[in-house]
Structure formats: C-alpha cells, structure tokens
Image (cartoon, rainbow, N blue to C red):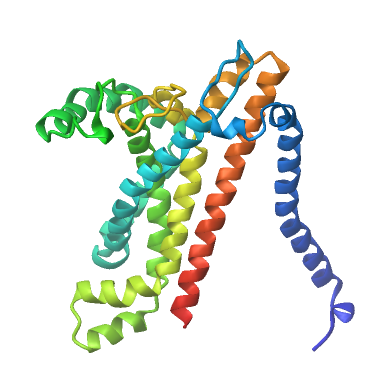
C-alpha cells in the first residue's frame, strides 16, 4: 500500500483541505467562545455567580441576573420536546414503514416545507392565530372545563402570550427536523431486521416495535438532540409569543423569558457598557447551556450505543 509520501499530489491536497475544513469547526467554536467571553468579562467580574442565580434585571440601576431567562429557556425547550418528539416519531413511522409510496412522498414534502418556513413567519402566525386561539379556547378549557386552574402548572389568568404558547410554537418548529432525522434512521434499518421478525410470525406493529425501533434507537435520540438544539437557540418566534417578562413562574399560562429573547429585545437599546456586557454574558450563558445539554445528550447516545453493542 503506498504511503502518503508516495501518493499522488491530488490525494495529498485533498487530505490537507479536508483536514483544514474539519479543524475549522472547533476553531470557530473556540474563537466564538473567546470573543463572547472577553465581551462578557466585565459583567462576570462585577456580579460573579449571582449573575446566573439572581432574578433582578434593572438596566437603570445596573443590576443584572439571568436566572429567570435560563429557567425559561430550559422550560420552553423541554415543553417543545415533550410535545414534538412523540408526534415526530409517529410521523417518521408512518412515512418510513406504513404509508404507501405515493403518500410517503407527499408527507416528506410537507415536512420539508415546514422546516423551510422562516422563523419570523412562525412568530407572526403564532402571535395572530395561535395566541388568540390559546387565550379564547385552550386555556379556558384547561383551567375551567378540566378543572386544572387550581394546579400550579395551569394557574393564573389566560393572557395568551405565555410559556405554553412558546413551547407549542417551538414544538411545531422543531417537529420537521426531528421527524426528518428519525425518518432517515428508520429507512436505514436493514430489511433483514424486518424479514427476520416477519419470519418468526410477528405482526407489522411488532416488527416496528421490537425489530426496527431498537435498532434505530441511537439515531432517534440524535434526532431529538437536533430538535433540542433548534429549540434552545430560537429567538424571534419565541420573542413574539412568550410575553417577555423577567420573572419566575411555575404556571404555563404566565409570561416568561428566554436568553435569546432577552438579547433580542435589549441589545439594540443597550447603551451602557455594563448593560452590553451583561447581554454578552447572557449570550455566554446560552452558549454554556447549549454545550452542556448537548454534551449530556451525546453521552446518552454513546451509552445507548454501548448498551446495544453489549
């Protein structure tokens, strides 16, 4: 086998270019982290850990704390995944396993179109269509007809713009991404898996449940991770429907805030150096939350693969 030294010049150039492109990804992440860290350092030095543990945000007095925004970011993303993941799984199973060929193409096209819609259009639809529907129909139904208004999760007045609206809109936005990944993962399962289960007398659903889904488990978790990353960083659509109130609340009917919407709302109006630094520190917190959550998710994928191999 020829070594790299004796290989054609084209192979060496190709290897150098691909290595450089691969190295550029962690390099960009490092440069981004350093730039945000430098800009956020004045706020970090001034407030320390209180910046991420306190809830007061007062630009006039120069007091900043992003704990409610971190809470809102995690809660809205978790709510979106709780809603979107089962729907995406059902859509992926239908398009990959159950639907006829002509219907699969139609459903795939519709899912791809949902992913291609700009987020600001989702926000406008959520503000003028979904929020009034939640305020007039869904929230009264949950609070009064189902008598959930006395529970902390559904207490308080039904304003419309709320954490529930943000979570539902995020679920609609991340659903096509999760479903697309799950669909491709299920389609990549070897037909031998299905044929072996059918040969043993399994029904169509048993084939999917016991032969296909376990084989594709790590890829399914990967699709959920992709949706989680999309939900954590969404800005404009969430800003339009979440209510933008910097406070803690256990009720899904209450207004909320996310790190991304906090930055989008205040960055253009921030004039004081400490205010700008606090917003950059909020960006650093969002980057840290995203990295930590994705690291945990990647560890789960590795663990699932390791258990499957053993």
In the figure, 240 relative to 284: above or below?
Answer: above
Viewer-closest of 251 and 11: 251
Q: Determine the residue positioned at 66% across, 19% down.
A: 275
Viewer-closest of 66 and 192: 66
In the figure, 201 relative to 116: above or below?
Answer: below
| Res. 106 in view | no
Which residue extends farthest right?
A: 5
Viewer-closest of 101 and 28: 28
Q: Quadrant of residue 167?
A: top left
In the figure, 229 relative to 50: above or below?
Answer: below
Q: Quadrant of residue 204?
A: bottom left
Measuring from the top left, give residue 271's x and y in whole percent.
68, 13
Judge from the rendering whether residue 110 lies leftward or rightward of residue 225; answer left or right: left
| Res. 85 in view | yes
Q: Quadrant of the N terminus?
A: bottom right
Q: Determine the residue positioned at 12% across, 35% down.
A: 146
Which residue extends farthest top?
A: 60
Q: Quadrant of residue 53?
A: top right
**Count of marks placed on residues:** 0
Which residue extends farthest left?
A: 145
Measuring from the top left, give residue 84's x and y in whole percent.
34, 48
Q: Determine the residue positioned at 60% across, 15% down.
A: 59
Measuring from the top left, give residue 104's x and y in whole percent.
30, 59
Measuring from the top left, give residue 3's x and y in whole percent.
84, 83
Viewer-closest of 26 and 12: 26
Q: Determine the residue positioned at 72% across, 18% down.
A: 273
């Amino acid at each position: 086998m020829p070594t790299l030294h004796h290989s054609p010049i084209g192979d060496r150039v190709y290897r150098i270019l691909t290595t450089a492109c691969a190295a550029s990804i962690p390099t960009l992440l490092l440069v981004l982290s350093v730039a945000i860290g430098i800009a956020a350092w004045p706020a970090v030095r001034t407030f320390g850990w209180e910046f991420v543990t306190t809830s007061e945000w007062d630009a006039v007095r120069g007091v900043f704390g992003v704990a409610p925004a971190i809470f809102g970011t995690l809660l809205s993303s978790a709510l979106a995944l709780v809603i979107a993941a089962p729907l995406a799984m059902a859509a992926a199973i239908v398009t990959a396993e159950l639907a006829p060929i002509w219907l699969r193409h139609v459903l795939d096209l519709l899912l791809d179109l949902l992913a291609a819609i700009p987020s600001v259009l989702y926000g406008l639809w959520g503000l003028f269509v979904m929020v009034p529907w939640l305020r007039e129909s869904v929230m009264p139904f949950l609070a009064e007809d189902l008598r959930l208004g006395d529970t902390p999760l559904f207490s308080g007045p039904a304003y419309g713009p709320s954490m529930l609206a943000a979570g539902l809109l995020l679920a609609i936005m991340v659903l096509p991404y999760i479903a697309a990944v799950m669909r491709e993962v299920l389609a990549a399962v070897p037909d031998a898996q299905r044929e072996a289960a059918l040969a043993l007398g399994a029904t169509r659903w048993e084939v999917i449940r016991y032969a296909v889904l376990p084989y594709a488990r790590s890829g399914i978790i990967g699709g959920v991770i992709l949706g989680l990353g999309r939900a954590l960083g969404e800005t404009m659509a969430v800003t339009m429907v979440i209510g933008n109130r910097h406070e803690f609340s256990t009720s899904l009917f209450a207004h909320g805030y996310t790190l991304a919407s906090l930055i989008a709302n205040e960055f253009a109006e921030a004039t004081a150096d400490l205010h700008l630094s606090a917003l950059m520190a909020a960006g650093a917190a969002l980057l840290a939350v995203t990295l930590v959550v994705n690291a945990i998710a990647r560890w789960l994928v590795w663990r699932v693969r390791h258990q499957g191999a053993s």
